[in-house]
Amino acid sequence: MITDPRIAVIGCGYWGKNLVRNFAQLRVLSVICDEDEKILNAQATLYPQVRATTRFEEVLEDPAVHGIVIATPAAMHYEEAQAALRAGKHVFVEKPLALRHDQGAELVELSRDTGLTLMVGHILEYHPAVTLLNDLILRKELGRILYIYSNRLNLGKVRQVENILWSFAPHDIAVICRVIGAAPVSVQASGGTYLQSDVHDVTVTDLEFDDGVRAHIFVSWLHPYKEQKLVVVGDRKMAVFDDTAREGKLKIYDKGIEWRAGLPVPRQTAETTLFFEETEPLRLECEQFVSCIQNGVRPVTDGESALRVLTVLQASQLSLDRGGIPVKLTEITGGGIGA
């Protein structure tokens, strides 16, 4: 147990600066690190009380640092998380955990062997609306889940290395697997490369679960308007989480199909808006990492859940590469961890 944890953030750019801000506000930030001196200096000016360095190795060797937050490009996550765990540091790494299942599985095993926290930044799982939705599903308020669909659409920010599947879809995969309580058994993905020949701008991914539940994820950064919507259809009620709505982000629809005289008849009744405390999900996520270091609690987005998401991503990418042919997750895992 560590009563006064000290945190270092590695990568202070587009997203890392938000992590820097939150850990600074929580009064646990002691070091910021970025290879780009211009980016580093911009953050150092905002937080002069925090030590700044361009050397990751210097952070690893610092005995005063208890936890390392990694917000560097995805290709660097595996090596940096591995180095941090081997250096005896608790780790919070932004999504994805790694780029391959075997790398992710190695990090999970290393975390288990060292007794150190391995937490992954699947921020949507910390959204109060998602927490409430998951509670409703666990209490069977919607009945038996039939299918789920999710749209995550916007115009930009276009990446030149990471495609839309790896950039946007992890959020939806994480939430869908969370509310279902399992990983899918197979996935099928298709998409298009319109701006760059080797980087998908649009993908549609279908997930099939072993209990017959299906989920559909549509992601695009080549879309005329922003949409972030999750729809969960149960045999009793339906739920809609619309994260772009100014008010009423989570609604329950008491609608469905009833059979009368052997014929399906739509049931149209009440619509209910559910309210929750408007807390920044990133703040809740950062608070959880601090609590993990202080109290040894297990994070919601632990290594095992992140490995599940990574497995789905890798299978989806393989389906994309094969022209949309379905891929079983056991082809990625060999039936082992993350299956």
Image (cartoon, rainbow, N blue to C red):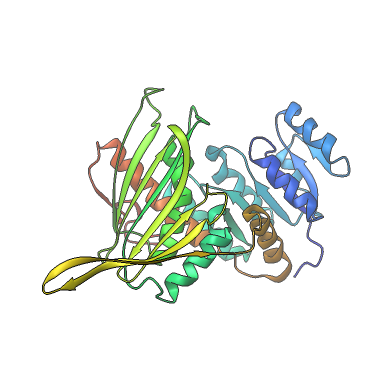
Provide residue 66's location: percent of width, then percent of height: 75, 57
- Report the front residue among 260 and 321: 260
Provide residue 95's location: percent of width, then percent of height: 53, 47
Q: State whether residue 93 is above or below residue 55.
A: below
- Report the front residue among 273 and 211: 273
Residue 182 appears in view: yes
Left or right: where 63 falls relative to 197: right
Write the residue at 81% across / 38% down.
52
**Image quarter (top left, top right, bottom left or bottom right) of the C terminus:** bottom left
Residue 85 sits in which quadrant? bottom right
Residue 109 appears in view: no
Tally the marks. Answer: 0
Q: State whether residue 99 is above or below residue 224.
A: below
Write the residue at 60% across / 64% down.
276
Write the residue at 11% across / 74% down.
261
**Image quarter (top left, top right, bottom left or bottom right) of the N terminus:** bottom right
Q: Residue furthest front?
A: 269
